[in-house]
Amino acid sequence: MKERRKHPRNAVRARVNISHGSFGTLNAVTLDISDGGISVLLETERKIPVGSHLQIRMLDSANPHINFNMKVIRQEGRVMGMQFIDFELRGQRHRIEELMTEMKKTPGGL
């Protein structure tokens, strides 16, 4: 079957924290990342409704202080897929496209 995704996935294993006011913080590991979103494996199974908005911090990133605002688009057991909405850096919200443009210009990202 041919992959019809807009953004190609890259297999990446990195630690992340997922947070929301209703459950606090969960630990997870990324399975893959694309320009459009991220797929993670939760440390423990937790049902999070599709459509929920969460914050993600990529702990193994060059800039783990960036908070990514995400939307849950699917969940199957411990695997959850999320779409990038925007990101927060130094108290300011930015479009995700700004980060992608900067990462392509600067080796190693922001």
Image (tube, rainbow, N blue to C red):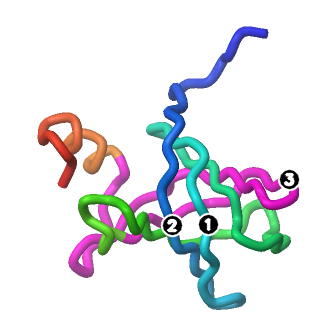
The image quadrant that residue 48 belongs to is: bottom right
Which amino acid does the dot numbered 3 rest on? Answer: Glu
Could you tell me how far apart the alpha carbons at marks 1 and 3 are, in whole angstroms?
14 Å
- Compared across the picture, whether 54 is left or right of 92 comes to right
- Compared across the picture, whether 31 is left or right of 86 comes to right
Decide whether residue 75 is among the magenta residues.
yes
Q: Secondary structure at mark 3?
A: strand
Q: Which residues are magenta?
A: 67-96
Is the C terminus in the top left, top right, bottom left or bottom right quadrant? bottom left
**Which residue ends up furthest to the left in the rendered image?**
106
In this rendering, the answer to whether 72 lies above or below 36 is below
Residue annotated with mark 1:
28
The image quadrant that residue 61 belongs to is: bottom left
Q: In the image, residue 64 lies at what x, y percent?
A: 32, 69
Residue annotated with mark 2:
16
**Which residue ends up furthest to the top in the rendered image?**
2
